[in-house]
Image: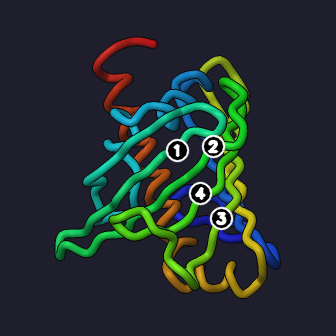
Amino acid sequence: MDDILGVTVTQGETDLTFTKQFRAPQELIFTMFAEAEHIKQWWGPEGWTMSFCSVDFRPGGEWRYCIRNAEGEEHWSRAVYNEIVSPEQITFTDQFITAAGDAIQGMPSKHVVITLTQETETTTGLKVHILLKSAEEREQLVNMGFARGFPETLNHLSQHIQQLTKEKEF
């Protein structure tokens, strides 16, 4: 178990789990994962921005996105929502794709379960559990920098929430 930027990261044989506390209500954090206008503001590790985001937030719907760094390197992904229980859980399968939408062979596909738990009136616990098909795929994802980059992404979420709550009361 590691603490990276205030995010607890646990690695199992075929999975990664990220947990973080947020000073925000559960419904607000759920919305941050549900709406493209919000996802665009925070999704991606340090130095990356979201250049494309399309969200069809319903079971069977797709979320397609592209993150890009300052050098122009792009990474495209497609997630298919399996289950949505508002405001507690979002489950989807995520895979790396080409800009044309084709799956990239040899890249790990991830089964992701996001769980939000209202702990107090103003505190919500976030748990992101990522299950891969094998220990080799988990290692590949870690070697790509995911175990470090995803905590950076969650810190961007925290910053986005702080900015929103400064602008209006929830």
* Lower sequence index among marks 4 and 2: 4
Residue wearing tag 4? 7
Name which quarter of the figure residue 90 lies in.
Answer: top right
Q: Which of marks 4 and 3 is nearer the N terminus?
A: 4
Estimate the x, y position of residue 62 in percent, counting from the top left.
Answer: 52, 44
Q: Which residue is at a point 35% across and 64% down the rendered structure image?
A: 100
Find residue 86 and report its horizontal and vertical position in percent.
67, 24
- Closest to the camera, between mark 3 and mark 1, is 1
Q: 15 or 164, which is in the foreground?
A: 15
Kindly identify the amino acid type of the residue bearing the numbered disc 4.
Val
Q: Residue tagged by mark 1? A: 62
Q: Earlier in the sequence, mark 4 or mark 1?
A: 4
C-alpha gap between disc 1 and disc 2: 6 Å
- How far is disc 3 from disc 1 in space, using C-alphas? 14 Å
Task: Look at label 1 and name its amino acid.
Answer: Glu
Q: Does residue 5 appear left or right of residue 15 in this picture?
A: left
The span from disc 4 to disc 1 (Cα, nearest Å) is 27 Å
Find residue 143 and report its horizontal and vertical position in percent. Answer: 55, 86
The local crowd at label 1, few if under 14, some if 14 to 19, many if 20 or more residues have their Cα within 10 Å, is: some
Q: Which mark is residue 110?
A: 3
